[in-house]
Amino acid sequence: MPAPEKTPGWLERRLPVMSVLRREYIAFPMPRNLNALWSFGAFLMVTMAIMIASGLFLAINYTPDITQAFASVEAIDRQIPSGWFLRSLHMGGVTMLFACLYIHIARSLWYGSYKAPRELLWLTGLGMMLMVMVTAFAGYVLPWGQMSYWGATVVLNAAHTIPLIGKPVSELLLGGETLGNTALHRLFVLHFTMAFAILAVIALHVIALHVVKPNNPSGIDPVSPKQTLPFHPYYTSRDGFALCLFLMVYAGLVFFLPDLLTLADNYVQANPLVTPRDIRPEWYFAPFYAILRAVPSRLGGLLLAVGSLAVLFALPSLDRSPTRPATRRPLVRLSLPLAFLSFILLGVAGMHPPTETWLIVSRMAMAWWFIHFLVVMPLVSEREITS
Amino acid sequence: MTQSETPPPEGGTKRRDLLTTATVTLGCAGACALAVPFLNSLKNPAATTLSDKTIEVDLSSLAPGQDMTVQWQDWPIFIQRRTPQMLAALQTPAHIATLRDANSKMLQQPKDATNWHRSVRPDYGVLVGICTHLGCVPSFEKPGSAPEAAGGYFCPCHGSNFDAAGRVAERAPAPYNLPVPPVTFLSDTKIRIGHSAGDPGFSMSDIQQI
């Protein structure tokens, strides 16, 4: 809807927000063939907003002190008016956030959205995923339940195995060798500092998207205006509808299944003398936990868990093929779904006790994940015949 | 500035470059110096250091096959009273073959516990209850209960198992045996944890790993 040109108004002359909004969110040309997977970015934005709002209001009632943290979270659940809702919204939000994040990334992998000229879009997105992980880890410690304490202890001890710097750095950051009051207070500060830092990176991510324009399922950038649609009303209404469906799932989790993804042990206050029998990570960390556990050496496990993410960062240089979507690349079309399956299998293995069978499953899935990114992608991009 | 005697046109540029580099370098150095007090403030004055504190534990209520947990240096300390069957199981060659460090070669115990039962007296075992893998607290498997029929410890986090003497299984992710604290028997049913009469020079800070 091109607005008729007139003399710019008072605000426009000083801060051209209205014309920028019009250009980037109303007239912005979107590829007309986007499918439902392109709505997950919008879901992520909305979830982030809900997380920050609910997090701020939870922080008002939370006490970052090991003697009071657990009780203050219980008070939020039981005594603060609507506190149960805010907490459920925040806890359910983590699941929605990670689910959307993983789907969003899988979509980029499938349609080759990480390739030129969108490398920075890909890297800012992955950087944001790491920040979300750090934030989620710090946030999970805050209720000071048994799972909070022991999950963090395991991660901390894994970090201690990094040669030379591991121990001194983690002691400096957490104020001691073991988890205590200082550590809890600092993780609380880290938790909400990171949340706001993520907002800043979202801005970079979205600006980069508006510079390079969205990818699309065909992997061929639209050349003529006929192949595009203005963002409003076409994609605002479509994303709006998709958001309604998304919020229905989210609300279902918050109102009907608040305990689906929480572990009963985390409703027992942290006890440094007893590790719960059935220790499990949250589902979104399960794949990395499975890797940590599948490797007999501690440092090796940590390196491979970090490496499983590092290969994603390296992907734009590992996959040199100019063809974007996997649908046009016969070998990638086979190999990539297996990599997705490996990730899911690692997640399932991470949620189960470390029996022989699950260890074998984790090792095979881990092997395929690395083979796909480090062997298949570089070789295939040199030799394949694309359709 | 010795170059200033012959200032060609590009000499001015060089001088400006030098000034820019010097300004940026000094600015960075200043920023780094300013960061020192910020990082310093992160050091925790109350950080835990090993104290010389000892505790005395009364074992008279401990029946054979039972275990108890006490706290020393913020660590859980497992004390078990072993049955003759448990002691026999520790010495079977088939069992010893499954262990990573059956003869306690790694410094994870005082000298008076560097033996097949890893304790001062065979009938009592005292261990620091922190898994050497990633620091969880293993749980005691009573003698007769699976999977360690002879009694032992199982870590719920990553499935490391230890025998009743705290020796780690070869296949477990934990790299070392459970540490043994310095222990002195004051009487038949009373021990002091924190000092070893058989190895007075022993310190927990010297061991391979908690």
Image: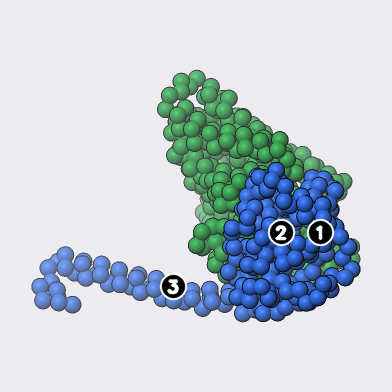
Chain colours: A green, B blue
Residue A311 sits above or below residue B64 on the image: above
Residue drawn at (56%, 45%) of the image: A304
Q: Tell me which chain the residue with mark 2 is part of.
A: B
- Whichever of labels 3 and 2 marks the residue nearer the N terminus, that label is 3
Q: Secondary structure at mark 3?
A: helix
Q: Residue at x 48, y 22 (%)?
A: A386
Task: Inspect the image, locate mark 1, and give the three-letter code of the amino acid beneath it.
Answer: Arg
Residue B134 seen in this snapshot: no
The amino acid at mark 2 is: His
Mark drawn on residue B82: 1
Confirm whether residue B103 shows in the render: yes
* Crowd rating for badge 1 (residues with CA inside 10 Å; few <14, some 14–19, many 20+): many
- A194 displayed left or right of A51: left
| Chain under numbered label 1 | B
Q: Which residue is mark 2?
A: B117
* Residue A264 image offset from top left, x and y in percent: 84, 53
Q: Nearer the viewer, residue A183 or A382?
A: A183
Residue at image location 73% in from the left, 52% down from the top: B90
Q: What's the CA distance linking mark 2 and mark 1?
A: 10 Å
Q: Which residue is mark 3?
A: B32
Disc on the earlier residue, 1 or 3: 3
Camera-near label (3 vs 2) is 2
**Labels 3 and 2 within one chain:** yes
Instruction: Please state the total of marks drawn on the protein image.
Output: 3
Q: Residues within 10 Å of mark 3 (few under 14, many from 20)?
A: few
